């Protein structure tokens, strides 16, 4: 992959080596492991009612920005595999599992080989009031990044414990109008570093996930969540 196809915006330049995706057990989630695929979502489907930013309403480029946002594909990940809120909301209340991806390999091998922007989500009490359109249309990342963070990577402070990072594939609007980039994307199987099973995940489902990798060259590390003995913390143990 051409390294120029990845851009780390702002604080995302210090992205962790592994990023995590929490999953409930479902046929769709298991297919993602079998096919080495991930879904990049339409941001208007997110669970934060304030996304996307209301600042779009005051931008002279509102229609263009709305198109860019609506047709982008966004993959939401976390930097932690032991987050109680994440397990509760996205990991089936500890009955699901969490997949740890090598940040580098995931970015290198996710198709298509188009520009991928990486953001560390910032959390605020109040939404941004406006977008600086002049900076947004700049060709310099240093000018454009702060405005793109407002659009793609800002959430209410109540979500702060998600420790979220986002990989964004923006639409090829200028060259391929009407062709959104949200949808299913493949990646190399060796992007998977580890799979962490929830503390309450049934044993037969754990074995079903393990069986997916039985005859593969690359096998991720398997771990399981355990409850802290004297605290509300979670920790992982190798299986």
Image: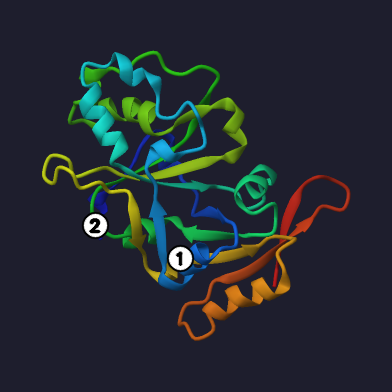
Quadrant the N terminus occupies? bottom left
- In the figure, 75 relative to 143: above or below? below
Asked if one can make out residue 113 in the rendered structure from this viewpoint, the answer is yes
Where in the figure is residue 189, as x and y percent of width and height? 42, 71
Q: How is the image coloured?
A: rainbow
Please give the label number shown on residue 32: 1
**Residue occupying image coordinates x 38% and y 30%:** 149
Residue 237: image quadrant is bottom right
Distance of label 2 from label 1 (alpha carbons)? 20 Å
Q: Secondary structure at mark 1?
A: helix
User: Mark 1 packing: few (<14 Cα in 10 Å), some, or many (20+)?
Assistant: some
Please give the label number shown on residue 113: 2
In the image: residue 47, left or right of residue 37:
right
Please give the label number shown on residue 20: none
Q: Is 211 in front, or is 31?
A: 31
Where in the figure is residue 115, as x and y percent of width and height? 25, 48
């Amino acid at each position: 992959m051409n390294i120029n196809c990845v851009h780390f915006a702002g604080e995302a330049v210090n992205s962790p080596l592994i990023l995590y995706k929490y999953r409930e057990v479902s046929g769709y989630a298991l297919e993602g492991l079998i096919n080495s695929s991930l879904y990049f979502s339409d941001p208007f489907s997110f669970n934060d009612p304030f996304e996307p930013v209301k600042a779009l309403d005051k931008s002279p480029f509102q229609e263009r920005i709305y198109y860019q946002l609506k047709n982008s594909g966004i993959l939401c990940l976390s930097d932690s595999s032991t987050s109680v809120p994440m397990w509760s909301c996205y990991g089936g209340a500890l009955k699901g599992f969490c997949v740890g991806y090598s940040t580098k390999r995931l970015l290198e091998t996710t198709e298509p080989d188009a520009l991928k922007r990486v953001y560390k989500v910032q959390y605020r009490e109040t939404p941004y009031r406006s977008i600086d359109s002049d900076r947004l249309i700049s060709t310099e990342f240093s000018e454009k990044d702060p405005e793109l963070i407002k659009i793609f990577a800002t959430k209410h402070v109540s979500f702060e414990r998600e420790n979220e990072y986002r990989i964004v594939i923006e639409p090829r609007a200028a060259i391929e109008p009407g062709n959104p980039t949200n949808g299913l994307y493949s990646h190399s199987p060796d992007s998977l570093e580890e799979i962490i099973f929830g503390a309450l995940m049934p044993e037969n489902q754990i074995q079903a996930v393990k069986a997916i990798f039985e005859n593969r060259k690359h096998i991720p590390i398997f771990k399981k969540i355990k409850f802290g003995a004297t605290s509300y913390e979670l920790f992982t143990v190798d299986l």
